[in-house]
Image: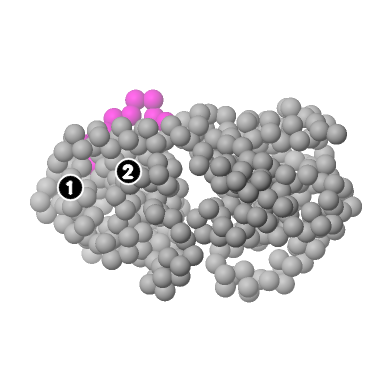
Amino acid sequence: MVAGELSGDAHGAGLLRSLVEMVPDLEIHGAGGPEMAEMAGPGLRDWVEDAAVMGVWEVLKRYGWFKQRFAEMLAELKKFQPDLLLLIDYPGFNLRFAEAVKRECPQTRIVYYISPKVWAWNKRRIPVMARVLDEVLCLFPFEPPIFQAAGLKSTFVGNPLVDELEEKRLPAAHREERLVGLFPGSREREIARLFPMMIATAQRLKSSDAGLKFEVPAASAKLAAQIRGLMAEAGDLITVTTGGSHSLMQRACCAVIASGTATLEAAYYGLPYCLVYRVAPLTYVLGKMLVKIEHIGLVNILAEEGVVEELIQARAEPVAVARSLGGFLESPAKRETLQARLAETSAKLGGKGAHQRAARAVAEWLARP
């Protein structure tokens, strides 16, 4: 097994919990995070703190380190001769590793859990995946036909996000009519780029409706401090919490949310929102050249239509965002219409039990002669 980020570690551990019940005599080697290491035992090492780097420049700076880990893991796999290699997300490393394993250990079956989003940004990788992988286990229902068209066995197992969000569902959630949620993302650069705009939006809305309340959930204490620093001149306009994003998604009347997983989470809870996305101009131009999809929001991609308003780059500014949120605040009917469409779209994520279904698919490969 190989996972290289905390999210992949959580998904890998979830799959393992089910798999060890189905195949109790498993011997597991590889690399992942603390949750996977706890489930797998001494054969799997925790490397995510060092492996989880983002950005081309960060990877290039540590090229030698990654090259060494790659060689070590390939040597370990050749010695271990596993029946199955299970790769979890982390495509920059894992797809290259799959190619090397296919070449060096052709008898080892290779299954990929949490498909890389090659349908969005690098379709040239699909034929490579079809050549080296035995099966890909997908989180979204539109993914299997893409891989199957290339001759790759592909199965929709559902999205483990459903299980996680159900665990955090409030038993008696009540939406506050005048509470607006602000979700500026979970990275410092993202917050620096988007939260000042959200403050200006809140000021604009508050000037015409003094009864409005605003709340922002920071992903960590460090990010909460950054947010409070940006609010220095805004007074007590916005309540800042550390954590609590899922609670706010169930209590707020509407929200503005940075593009990312939070938009899918909010949709699952039926929170009306608009999506905002803003990056450096050069990054956006390069992204437009590489990413060939009509929408950037996960909900809109899943629905294959524009369910949620997307305010991108120059459109992610206070006037436009205030106008979008104002529409929700002024019209319960508009909120209800969007909530119905969000429920319909979220249902496409599949029911609870994604990890169990993924584990069952892996167990079937292990049972083959």
Q: Position of residue 270 (x, y in %)?
A: 34, 35
Q: Position of residue 124 (x, y in %)?
A: 60, 60
Instruction: Give yes or no for residue 174 being in the magenta stretch.
Output: yes
Q: Position of residue 357 (x, y in %)?
A: 62, 31
Residue at the spot of label 2: 307
> How many numbered marks, from 0 up?
2
**Secondary structure of residue under mark 1:** helix
Q: Is residue 131 left or right of residue 179?
A: right
Q: Is residue 12 left or right of residue 142?
A: right
Instruction: Give yes or no for residue 270 being in the magenta stretch.
Output: no
- Which circle, 2 or 1, is nearer the viewer? 2
Q: Residue 314 falls in which quadrant of the image?
A: bottom left
**Furthest-top residue in view?**
171
**Secondary structure of residue under mark 2:** loop
Q: Earlier in the sequence, mark 2 or mark 1?
A: 2
Q: Position of residue 7 (x, y in %)?
A: 57, 48
Q: Which mark is residue 55?
A: none
Q: Amino acid at mark 2?
A: Val
Residue segment shown in magenta: 167-179
Give the dominant element type of the magenta stretch: helix, strand or loop.
loop
Q: Residue at x 66, y 71 (%)?
A: 62
Q: Is residue 318 above or below residue 336?
A: below
Which scheme is used to colour this image of the protein?
one colour
Q: Residue at x 74, y 27 (%)?
A: 22
Please state which of residues 127 and 225 is positioned toward the viewer in this rendering.
127
Q: Answer yes or no: is residue 202 visible.
A: no
Residue at the spot of label 1: 326
Q: Amino acid at mark 1?
A: Gly
**Furthest-left residue in view?**
208
